[in-house]
């Protein structure tokens, strides 16, 4: 299955949930009773963390791909940062799932 997003058609490149949350009427204010942010704000902060973590991993992989090998054939670049970045991405994804549950919670009185 191919997922395709286009700015001219969808308005942005975020997942479709972003558009649904953005179109919520202003009178939806159950988040105040739950002492939470607005659902769009929860989602926006959450997806930004996921995108930042993914971008950092892709940047690190790009640096690894362009790293040179020394005379013995070993990579002349430390790979110690990659597991840390992978861990952050997994934590961001798990937090995003939790944030989606928070959004469901604040949409109900």
Image (cartoon, rainbow, N blue to C red):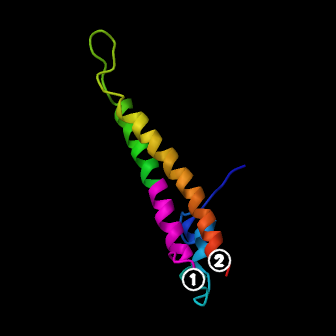
**Residue 6 has which mark?**
none
* Residues rendered magenta in the picture: 34-50
Q: Quadrant of the C terminus?
A: bottom right
Residue sitting at the far right: 1
How crowded is the residue under tag 2: few (<14 C-alpha within 10 Å), some, or many (20+)?
some
Q: Can residue 85 be seen in this view?
A: yes
Of 98 and 58, nearer the camera is 98
Q: Where is residue 99 in the image (x, y as percent from the top left)?
A: 56, 62
Residue of label 1: 33
Q: Is residue 95 located in the magenta-colored stretch of the structure?
A: no
Tell me if 69 is positioned left or right of 34 in this view.
Answer: left
Q: Distance between the residues labelled 2 and 1?
A: 11 Å
Main secondary-structure element of the magenta-colored stretch: helix
Task: Please give the name of the residue rendered at 35% of the width and 35% of the height, measured from the top-left corner.
Answer: 81
Q: Where is residue 72, by image quadrant?
A: top left
SS label for mark 2: loop
Q: Position of residue 9 (x, y in %)?
A: 61, 70
Task: Please give the name of the residue rendered at 30% of the width and 26% of the height, measured from the top-left corner.
Answer: 77
**Residue 107 has which mark?**
2
How crowded is the residue under tag 1: few (<14 C-alpha within 10 Å), some, or many (20+)?
few
Of the two numbered discs 2 and 1 in the rendering, the one whose residue sits closer to the viewer = 1
């Amino acid at each position: 299955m191919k997922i395709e997003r286009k700015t001219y058609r969808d308005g942005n490149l975020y997942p479709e949930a972003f558009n649904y949350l953005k179109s919520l009427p202003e009178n939806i204010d159950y988040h105040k009773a739950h002492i939470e942010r607005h659902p769009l704000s929860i989602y926006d902060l959450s997806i930004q963390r996921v995108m930042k973590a993914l971008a950092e991993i892709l940047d690190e992989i790009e640096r690894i791909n362009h790293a040179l090998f020394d005379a013995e054939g070993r990579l002349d670049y430390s790979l110690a940062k990659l597991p840390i970045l992978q861990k952050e991405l997994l934590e961001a994804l798990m937090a995003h799932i939790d944030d989606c549950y928070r959004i469901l919670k604040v949409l109900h009185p």
